[in-house]
Amino acid sequence: MSSGTVAVAPVGLPIVAAGAIVVAGALAVTAGAVLLARAVNSAAESGVRALGESGARLEAEIAAIEAAEAAGQWRRRAMADVVAVNARLRLVRERAKKAGVALPVPRPLTLSAEVSAARAVQWVSETEYEIARLHKELDAAAPPLRVTITAKTSRASGDISAELDRLRRVATERHTKRPAAVAAASITEVIGLLDPDATTQERDEMLAEAAAIVGRTEQSVYLSSLRSKIVATLNPRIERRRLAATWVSALEDGPLAEVVAGIDPPAPLRRTAAALREVVTGAHDLTPELRSEGVRLMAWAGGVADRAFMRDLVRKCLTEAGQEVLETFEGDGFTGLRFARPEWGDEHSTVVRVRDGNIIEHHLEAAHAPTSDNKKLIGEERCAAANAGIQAVAEAAAAAGVRVQLTESAPQVSGHEAPAAEYGTDTPIHRYRDGR
């Protein structure tokens, strides 16, 4: 029997939605957690996009992607867009909560092995339309904005109020139509540049400056200044808040939250989730330091999900191969499982350790060293059976988009460790034990 290494391939999402393996129960949860963690990474790498830049663009590219046989790329993009829209839903809820407005905000879509790319694209398109509608409701529910004139202008306060009302109506159009920044040359077009996920305060800040431009001399200078503020200051801040919402949503909703529940992250990251929540509420900005912590926190959560997925995959494959779980145990950086076939009694067992870094170690253990050639032959036969079970794990992992590398420990007696070497499963070896 061997020690083995199973590492998740660094190529993105596990391809489980295509029916490569059947997932249910605990395995479905951990597979969904892995899927979500990787979708979050994909979304963060490409930038968490706002309305009209995810579902609509993706739908336009589907034909080309299918023609290029890039189904994996299609799925990866679709899952990343689901994550981005889930983050936007959280921001809508935060805005409605702060405004004291009760809105029927849709629930986020829980990623799982059963969610196809086509289903994801459809949901993204429908939900972005609903997000735009909800933002318009919040815009309409916002109290009138009052502006105090402090600069020389040809307009009176009443004229400014009327202009504000007009611009508020214009601002709602940014939820459905956004001009290019380089082409925005009028107040209406510049207002349309504001990110749809802006808070009411950010929207009002922009509207106040826009309304004050009318009636000024040299309007082009003030318009350029407003455009710069929106593009270089407000929108980047909103994008950072959306990224924080992406992380918070993943950590608090759905399968990843279930997998990491009750597990403390490394000490330096134990306040990170709370700090990210404050960014989502608009209380703070996402600083470079907090962003770095967020990346590390998601890497930690992804590692927990990977390990849990591999543990449950081992459990599934070995129990389907006729082995029973005798016990589970924890150690420094690993989760252990002990299996045995009923007919083995207490003579042999398969011990598997799922370690950090997506490493699976496994070996066959004998209660005592063999005292005859017959017992030695029995041990080798049972080792071969255990090897077949581990090979089934490798095959199932590969079907789920996981790369597998197996290594072997030389024969040993309890208490004597031997160096590992690469091996093939057709040459069974085992080691003996007096304890674990």
Image (cartoon, rainbow, N blue to C red):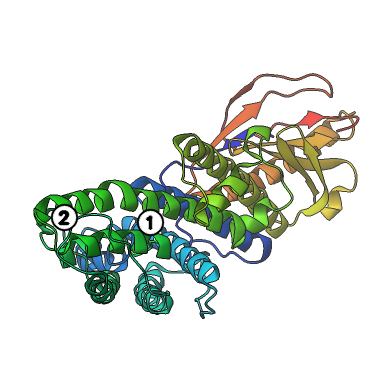
Q: Residue at x 55, y 48 (%)?
A: 276
Q: Is residue 242 visible?
A: yes
Q: Which residue is mark 1?
A: 76
Give residue 11's position: percent from left, percent from top: 40, 44
In the rendered structure, find residue 223 and report the number of the disc placed on it. Answer: 2
Give residue 204's position: percent from left, percent from top: 35, 64
Which element type, helix, strand or loop, lies under badge 2? helix
| Horizontal relation, residue 202 to residue 57: left or right | right
| Residue type beneath disc 1 | Arg
Badge 1 crowding class, 10 Å Cα cut-off, few under 14, some 14 to 19, many 20 or more, is many
Give residue 28's position: percent from left, percent from top: 61, 63
Q: Residue at x 18, y 60 (%)?
A: 213
Which residue occupies the foreground of this view, 381 or 68?
A: 68
368 over 123 or under it: above or below? above
Q: Is residue 399 visible?
A: no
| Horizontal relation, residue 399 to residue 221: left or right | right
| Residue type beneath disc 2 | Leu
Which residue occupies the foreground of this view, 76 or 262?
A: 262
